[in-house]
Image (tube, rainbow, N blue to C red):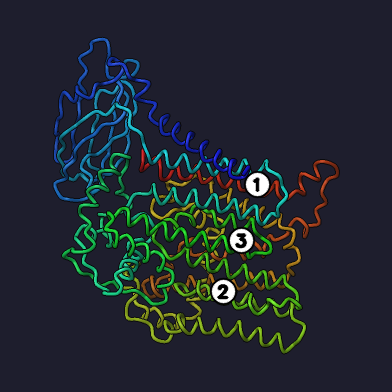
Amino acid sequence: MKKHLDTILMVVTALILGALTAVFSQMGPFLHMSAKASYEESEAIKTVLITGTGKCSIIMNDEDADTVGRYINKLSIAVYPKEDRVLPLSIRVNTYENGETVSYAMNDVNPVYVKNEIIRIDRNNVVSVDIESSDRSAFSVSDIKIQNGFSFNFIVFIFASLSAYAAIYCVWAFFRKKDIGPGVVIRKMFLTASVCFGVCLCLCLPANKVGNDEETHLQAVMQIASFPSNELHVSEGLMNQLSVTEYNNPDAQPGSYEEIIEFETVLSNKSDYKEGARAPQFYVMANRVPAYLAMAVAAKVGKGLSLPWPVILRMIRLANLAVYIILMWLSLKVLPCGHMLMAVIGLLPQNLFMASTVSYDPFVTGCLMLGMSFLLRVMYGTEKDGKLIRDTFFMLFFMFLGCLPKAVYAPLMLIALVVPFRRLKDRQQRVIYACAVISVFVFTMLLFVIPTIVAPADTGDTRGSTDVSEMSQMGFILGNPMKFAGILLSQMARWIPQCLIGPDCTTFMGHIVTGTSEFRGYWFIYFILFVMAAAVQGENASIKAKERLWGLFMCFGTGVLIWSAMYVSFTSPGATEIAGVQGRYFIPVLFPVYLSLFGGAIRLAGIKLPEGKLAKLVSDERIWYDLMMAVLVGLMILTLWKTVIFPYCM
């Protein structure tokens, strides 16, 4: 009963904190409630001057002789581009301060479907606002309104409530009795944090393209969901969501709570997914169906219930999140050691973001992590353990399942070749075990990789370049093997550090967080967490040097396949730079890399702990786990606020 009482108390506290945050986020209108301090909504605008094809100046109405300019929270403007397209805007807010005019610049984008552009000003003494289209496109404006009234932001409420619960749970976990194993503690904390932040992302992200290649994955999901007829009848509005157009351009997301409501209302009306005039047929690769299956079921249910398209899209994202969390939770449950390292990787902003959008990457990562968990269980078992065959089967099964969409991870299977020499004494058993592992590896390569080498296609992924040709590229590689090896190794040497410790694999979140919008130096905290999480796991010290080198070599082989695959399918023939490689491709190799490099580093280094109370504190792994999890939760709260809530939902 006490356990349930604690949970209820934490939920109630989180909801109260969420409500208070939503209220305090609107403190501007409260602080400027007097008519003298702020403009009245009915006062509207004194003059609007259209000075050209891509500019307008809005002069505020201020007839009070004692006041020059007053407070504005938000300015609502109906914007009408000359063409129905995304309109990037440069905005300058002019205020009168200390006897002179001061200007504040900001940028915004008026996305298609949203006519009422909401400009969040939240400043005193505003006298005018100048608006100019960044690309000099012609536009007109009307219905200019001042919004100084209070409005409850439900998205901020959801974010603050879920974030508060995750933080409260971390504090509660730190102070409660430590009578359970570290693996159980980490598993529970991971489950709480991943559910809270994943659900927050699914609900708070705009119902538009924000993830990596999200429209491509969505095409496959909708095609599978059309079973058994395999026919799609969609409207032009929904077709725009399934295609790479500026309708779902990442830079054209709704930029406020009011814009999100308008955007989703119009999108719901325009997105017919049952009787639309368009009947596209999207190609779905059979090897990717398992990764899309849960999302397709969610789409099928949403279509059957005739739900609005934004709701269906969020159901698809939630289904993807559920699969990812289940696979990662099972990985932590199976794992005999290295729990904290896997939890850190599982809670990377990049990972949670992909799991909360439409993508097959979370399925790949989750299956490979579960396969590696079974691999470590096999390694740390004994010869007399009767579960060897069962665990080996699950290890190979989940690794193969993870390689279905991306076979470039097949070399990770070969890490299991260390098991026979570590656990089996009989030579015949070693040979049988090694043959089983190699057979699955070869089958995976023959099924997905070798066909590209033997029979390459005439074209490749034209998003990289219009002249991409797998056939021409393979001809170049076979004709110039040494030159290709030089290109490959040179670029790997320059980029692998960035892909293993940099923001490319930690803090990037699709199209909403890039090199210009992430926290500077933010990724370095995750690198410290990687090293600490691996180092404090004392059990890992039993990994032998040869086993560590073999694991790193297989990770290197995986990197070679990743770079080579992008060179063949995404890069112009003969180019000296490999295009299209992203840090997220290397997330599945982070666990074996850091485990091999830093696993049990404290014991291996022969560090002697101090005596007395400090020794007890330093040697208490639970304290380190709790602190690292608290840092992870804090980083996720900051990340979501900076990259999702503030720019898109405020």
Most extreme residue toward the front, as rendered?
Answer: 1
Q: Which residue is mark 1?
A: 626
Most extreme residue toward the right, as rendered?
Answer: 611
Decide: few, some or many residues near mark 3? Use Cα within 10 Å; few <14, some 14-19, many ≥20: many
Q: What separation in Å lies between label 2 and label 3 (alpha carbons)?
A: 26 Å
Q: Viewed as shown, does residue 591 lie left or right of 230?
A: right
Rendering coords of residue 355 (x, y %): 45, 58
Q: Amino acid at mark 2?
A: Gly
Whether residue 25 is visible: yes
Q: Which residue is mark 3?
A: 332
Q: What separation in Å lies between label 1 and label 2 (alpha carbons)?
A: 35 Å
In terms of secondary structure, where does tag 1 sit?
A: helix
Whether residue 494 is visible: no
In terms of secondary structure, where does tag 3 sit?
A: helix
Nearest the viewer among 642 and 268 is: 268
Q: Amino acid at mark 1?
A: Asp
Decide: few, some or many residues near mark 1? Use Cα within 10 Å; few <14, some 14-19, many ≥20: many
| Residue depicted at 48% across the width and 49% down the height | 197
Decide: few, some or many residues near mark 2? Use Cα within 10 Å; few <14, some 14-19, many ≥20: some
Residue 557, label in figure? 2
Q: Is residue 643 above or below residue 544?
A: above
Q: Viewed as shown, does residue 132 lie left or right of 484?
A: left
| Residue depicted at 49% across the width and 34% down the height | 17
